[in-house]
Amino acid sequence: MRPANAVVAVVDDEENIRETVGFALRREGYPVELYAHGLEAWRAFQKKLPGLVIIDILMPEMDGLELCRKLRAISETLPIIFLTSRDDELDRVLGLEIGADDYLCKPFSMRELLARVKVLFRRAALDPKPAAGEAPLRIGDLELDLQRYAVKWRGAAVSLTVTEFMMLHALVRHPGHVKTRKQLHQDGYPHDAYVSDRTIDSHIKRVRRKFEEVDESFDRVETVYGLGYRWKE
């Protein structure tokens, strides 16, 4: 079931890509908005946010990284997918650290893009009310609401993207146990076989930073060098 706001915004200065992606999305039944650069999109988003955004990184007026920063300042839950060339690994990592949920390298498979859009919408199409009798998961000072994808640490809200939430949940399900990057990859990107270790590291780095913003002494996500990460008991 799609969320009420299933509008997909495509922001790319290459008209051919913009129109081709828009056509494929419309064929799948999604309402689509097309923007030629970041500034044009940002002006529209300030009035109303779409349901999901596909953003090219390299654009005139306002690039994709800056647009992502602005969007994350007003919404941590808006699904964001980056489009990037194969040589832009640094930009991909920066994009994930800023808060993108996913990325695709150009040239990309349209079928793969549509699959990722579907996955992110499925994650977003959650019942805002917890199921009857289903209490949030509490582990010490941590509280995870698995229905709302909401997190609290010592009573303070921590705003995570859906991908970040899924990786955190994977860590805290078994406190003290090491989760390899491959295992975190499977939890955060179940439909993507090509996510790099640096992508996983970027998400974990961002999770840590967000917890530290509400508690500067936070140290529960531990790096186990050569293996992966664990939630300290």
Image (tube, rainbow, N blue to C red):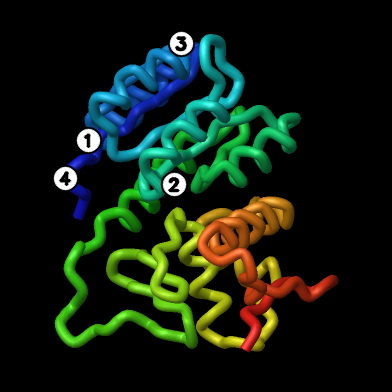
User: Which residue is under mark 2?
Assistant: 116
Identified by mark 3, the residue type is: Glu
Residues at marks 3 and 4 touching, judged by CB atoms closer than 8 Å: no
**Of tags 4 and 1, which is closer to the observer?**
4
Name which of mark 3 and mark 1 comes first in the sequence: 3
Residues at marks 2 and 1 touching, judged by CB atoms closer than 8 Å: no
Which element is circle 3 on? Answer: helix
**Of tags 4 and 2, which is closer to the observer?**
4
Label of residue 4 in the image? 4
The crowd level at tag 3 (other Cα within 10 Å; few <14, some 14-19, many 20+) is few
Name which of mark 3 and mark 2 comes first in the sequence: 3
Q: Residue furthest front?
A: 216
**Of tags 3 and 4, which is closer to the observer?**
4
Identified by mark 1, the residue type is: Gly
Which element is circle 4 on? Answer: loop
Which element is circle 1 on? Answer: loop
User: Which residue is under mark 1?
Assistant: 29
Q: Is residue 49 left or right of residue 173?
A: left
Identified by mark 2, the residue type is: Arg
* The C terminus sits in image quarter: bottom right
Name which of mark 2 and mark 1 comes first in the sequence: 1
The crowd level at tag 4 (other Cα within 10 Å; few <14, some 14-19, many 20+) is few
> In the figure, residue 211 lies in which quadrant?
bottom right
Name which of mark 3 and mark 4 comes first in the sequence: 4
